[in-house]
Image: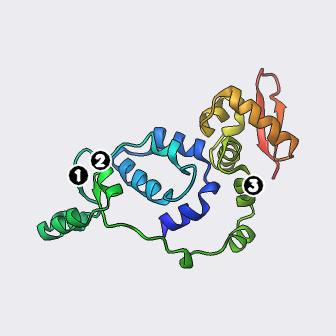
Amino acid sequence: MATTWLHTYGDLLAKHRLKRLIRDELELEYQPILGLLLEIAQQGTHPPEFETVIKILRPAPRPHPLFKSSSKNPKLRELAKHKASPISRRWNLWCQPIEFKDDAIRPASWLMRRHPEFVTQADFRGDLRASILASLRFDKDAGHSELRLADRSGGSRAQLRNSLRNLEISGRVSTRKAQGANRREIALMI
């Protein structure tokens, strides 16, 4: 289900922020699992939807079954190795090919009605503006300064300023000079 959702709605992910979260918060043992998940999800997308994120992830140090239950049983371990897909072998996590279950996820109209913030995410197709909005929404004190917001959203300060101009013009964020300081504070308007 996760790969199907990511394949269908990958444009909703704030990719700059995701890379920052991977770099700063994701334990190494989970990197190959996320890499496998994203690589499967981007199959058939042009250009590859998660290519920039996948580049920072590393495969498992040694090949083994994706599921721990298969690792404990020698017969299941051998079966997992034998049936492993080429993508799973690249990540050293043996699993069978995964088929998307398009009929099991809700249509875009349903998703957007229930999560209106996704409309903006879809408009921005996961670019830095989407990461800025997600950081302001979910990261404590992200809007305290441009420097902090650049760090939380995963962009450079120059990239951030360029994106902030667009977000201000479109009424999605407001910026103001912090009282008694030489910095700008940024806040969500939506």
Q: Amino acid at mark 1?
A: Pro
Where does residue 3 sit, x and y in percent of width and height? Answer: 48, 64
Where does residue 100 sit, x and y in percent of width and height? Answer: 48, 70
As drawn, 162 above or below 80: above
Q: Amino acid at mark 3?
A: Thr
Do the residues under discs 2 and 3 have CB atoms within 8 angstroms? no
Compare residues 96 and 118 and report the one nearer the observer: 96
Compare residues 62 and 27 and report the one nearer the observer: 62
Q: CA distance from mark 2 to mark 3?
A: 35 Å
| Tag of residue 63 | 1
| Tag of residue 148 | none
Q: Amino acid at mark 2?
A: Ala
As drawn, 166 above or below 184: below
As drawn, 143 above or below 113: above
Kind of element beneath mark 1: loop
Compare residues 151 and 45 and report the one nearer the observer: 45
Circle 2 residue:
60
State which mark lies toward you, 1 or 3. 1
Where does residue 67 sit, x and y in percent of width and height? Answer: 28, 64
Q: Is residue 77 left or right of residue 46?
A: left
- Crowd tier of the residue under label 3, counting other residues whose Cα lies within 10 Å: few below 14, some 14–19, many 20 or above: some
Task: Name the residue at 50% across, 74% down.
Answer: 101
Task: Name the residue at 66% across, 44% down.
Answer: 127
| Tag of residue 120 | 3
Going by the picture, which residue comes out furthest to the left?
A: 74
Compare residues 173 and 180 and report the one nearer the observer: 173
Task: Name the residue at 44% across, 54% down.
Answer: 39
Do the residues under discs 1 and 2 have CB atoms within 8 angstroms? yes
Q: CA distance from mark 1 to mark 3?
A: 40 Å
- Crowd tier of the residue under label 2, counting other residues whose Cα lies within 10 Å: few below 14, some 14–19, many 20 or above: some
Residue 149 visible in the displayed image: yes
